Amino acid sequence: MDLLFCNDRLGEYPPSLYAQTRAALADFAPLRGEVRADVCVVGGGYTGLSAALHLAEAGRRVVLLEAHRVGFGASGRNGGQLGSGQRLEVDELERMAGREAAHHLWDMAEAAKALTRALAARAGVPVADGIAHAFRKPSEFDHARAMIERLARDYGYHAIEALDRDGFRALVPSEAYVAGELDMGAGHLHPLNLAIGMARLADAAGAVIHERSAVTGIRHGDVTGQTRVTTAGGTVLCDHLILACNGYLGDLEPKVAARVMPINNFIVATEPLGARAREVLARDIGVHDTKFVVNYWRLDPEGRLIFGGGENVSYRFPADIFAKVRKPLLQIYPGLADVKLTHAWGGTLAITMNRMPCFIRPAPNCLSASGYSGHGLALATLAGKLMAQAVAGQSEGFDTMAALPQPPFPGGAALRWPLLVAGMSWYALRDRLGV
C-alpha cells in the first residue's frame, strides 16, 4: 500500500485546521526533464526543508523533490508541540549509550529546540512557551520527580516543575490525571506554517523545490559515479542524496524501511470555545499524557481545542475520524460533549524499535534520518542540518546519532504490517486497562 496516495488527494493538503489557517505559498512546479545538483533531497517536511535550507545557504546546488506539497506529511499535520530532550528520557539514554553520550544527546536536543525557534522566528511563526506532561498513575509522578531532579543536578536543566494533583488540575482541569509536570523550556506552534516558512527560506537561499514530484526510483552510483533519482516527469543527477521521507518512504530504501515503521494518528479541532477555553487549559500551553497511544492537545489563538488521539490498526484512515478522536477527548473533558468538532484529519508518522531516530547511510554518498516516534518537530529540523553538515564533511553530529542502536523490526519491512496490528492492539488494551 502506497501511503503517499492511499489516504490523500494528489498535491492537496488534508482538510485540517492548519491547512485552513496556513500562510499563503505559491505551488512549486513539478520536475521536468533532467537536472544536475550537488545534492538531491527527497521529502519536503522539516528534515528535508532544513537540509535544503542549510545546504543552499552553504552554497550547494540543491534540488528538493516532494510528492505532494511542502509540509504535506507529518510536518504539517502534527500536534505542534516543540518538546525537550530526545524521545527517551535521560535514564534510558544512559542505559543505552552511557552517561557521556547521554549528555551529548541531551545537548543536541536542546540545540534542536534552539534551531527550531530560530527558524520559526525567521519565518514569522510565533512560538508559545510551555508543555505539560499528564500522569495517569502515582508511579509516573514519582518517576518524573526523580527525572526532574536528575536533569537539574546532572544536565543543568531547570525549566521543568512538578505539579501535584491540585496544582496540575489548576492548570489542566480534568479528573483523568493524578499529577503532572510543566516544562517551560518546551513550546508549541502552527506546524504547517513552520514548514511553509522553512520552504520560503530555502527557496530564497537558492534551493530548487519541485512539488508533485514523487520519486519512483533511485540508482546509486551510475556509470558517471552519480546517483540518479527519477520521478514520473524527470531525473535528478546528484553527487549526494538525502532521504527525508519518514513514514512515507515506502520501498525506496529497504535498509531504512526495515528499521522504520509508519503508523497513523488522528486529530480534531473544535469550534472556538470562547470563555469555555478555561475548562480545558488555564494557560496557553500544550499537553500530552503517558498513554502509549498518546493523547495530546492545545488551544490555538482563536481558542479552538486541537486534540490528537485514537489508535488505528489499518494504514487506511477510518471513515469517521471525528468519532475516532471524540472518544478519548471526552474521556478527558466530558463537559465538552456539546461542543462542535469542525475539522478532523489523519497523518502518517514513523516509529523505530527503540523509539530513537534512525540515522543511517544506506549507500555511499546517501544519508537518511527518520523514525522520530512522535517527537520530531525539533529533532527532524536538527536532522536536516546534521545531514547538510555531513555532506560538507562535518559529520560528528550525524555520526553521534547513527552510532545509536538501530535494530530492524523482526522480519524487516515485510512483517511491519502484522506487527503494527498486533502491537497497536496490545498497547491499546494496556491503555484501556490503565497498565
Image: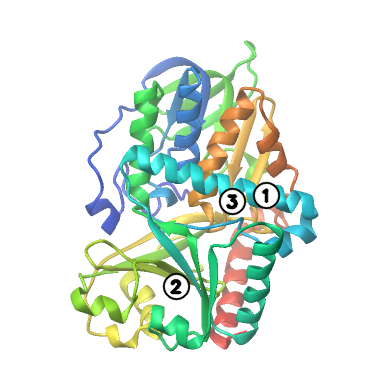
Sequence-first disc among 2 and 1 = 1
Q: How would you rate the neighbour count of disc 2 (Cα within 10 Å): few for under 14, some for 14-19, many for 20 or more?
A: many
Q: Secondary structure at mark 2?
A: loop
Identity of the amino acid at label 2? Gly
Q: Secondary structure at mark 3?
A: loop
Q: How would you rate the neighbour count of disc 1 (Cα within 10 Å): few for under 14, some for 14-19, many for 20 or more?
A: many
Say if 98 sits above or below 310 in the image. above
Residue 233 percent coordinates (x, y): 38, 25
Residue that carries the numbered disc 1 in the rendered image: 105
Say if 100 sits above or below 176 in the image. above
User: Which quadrant is the C terminus positioned in?
Assistant: bottom right
Given residues 9 and 170, the one toward you in this image is 170
Identity of the amino acid at label 1? Leu
Given residues 428 and 96, the one toward you in this image is 96
Residue that carries the numbered disc 2 in the rendered image: 310
Q: Which mark is residue 371?
A: 3
Mark 2–mark 3 contact, CB under 8 Å? no
